[in-house]
Image (cartoon, rainbow, N blue to C red):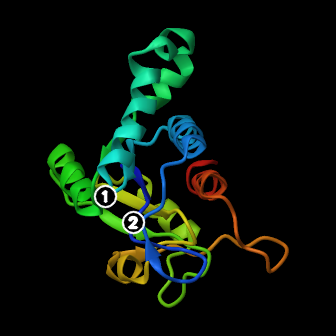
Amino acid sequence: MLYIALLHYPVYNKEGKIVTTAIANMDIHDIARIVKTYDLNGFYIVNPIEEQRLLAQEITDHWLKGYGADYNQFRRAAFELITIKETLQNVIDDIAEKTGFVPQTIATGAHIAGDILRFAELKRMLQGNNKPYLLLFGTGSGIADEVIMTSDFRLESIKGLSDYNHLAVRSAVAIILDRLMSD
């Protein structure tokens, strides 16, 4: 079982300070569609600011209950996988309640170091395993070290053909899920 969480806190800004980032409409749409394409178990949006969670819920409701639900059935199917939570711990608790197991967390980032889990290793771990895993993606300039260091695993960074590594989070989600879930 594989879930993903998009963290808006605690994440870094460009200056290296821990901040809360704003909900981005494009991230919700694009990541939900990626999650549906690769048949994941769920997509969590994490933001501690109530107004931001309400905004995410309003966007989600439009495609689940509003005009958008009738207008675009494919989008509605993707949005059915979204759950909005205040904290990462709320996500972990929700998955544990649904599955009976505390998910193992896997941090992602452009500059992950130390004991690293390779894509191929994680792909093997996911095959035929009925226990939940939670891939953590960060907004802003990446997930705060406190989350990375307390995660069960740290996934290797995406490596392109140059030293440049500052992808939009929705691009990183697409690349990583393709590496993990495709044949």
Coordinates of residue 115 in the picture (x, y in percent): 47, 88
Q: Is residue 2 at least partly visible in the picture?
A: no
Location of mark 1 (residue): 48
Q: Nearer the viewer, residue 66 or 157?
A: 66
The front one of 167 and 133 is 167
Residue nearest the viewer, comparing 45 with 183: 45
Do the residues bearing badges 1 and 2 touch, measured as CB atoms within 8 Å? yes
- The answer to which of marks 1 and 2 sits earlier in the sequence is 2
Q: Which residue position holds label 2?
A: 9
| Spatial CA span between label 1 and label 2 | 7 Å
Mark 2 closeness class: few <14, some 14–19, many ≥20 residues within 10 Å: many
Circle 1 — which element? loop
Farthest front residue?
51
Residue found 51% across the figure and 38% down from its top: 32
Is 134 drawn above or below residue 24 in the view shown? below
- Report crowding for label 1: few under 14, some 14 to 19, many 20 or more residues within 10 A (C-alpha): some
Q: For residue 118, which quarter of the picture?
A: bottom right
Query: Is 39 rendered above or below residue 90?
Result: above
Residue type at mark 1: give it. Pro
In-image side of 72 versus 47 (left or right): right
Q: Residue furthest right?
A: 161
- 48 left or right of 16? left
Q: Work out whether residue 46 can be spotted.
A: yes
Residue placed at 48% from the left, 12% from the top?
Answer: 67
Q: Secondary structure at mark 2?
A: loop
Q: Is residue 5 above or below residue 35?
A: below
x and y, in percent, of residue 91 in the image: 27, 54
- Residue depicted at 36% across the width and 54% down the height: 46
Query: Among all residues in the image, which is located at the extreme top?
Result: 70
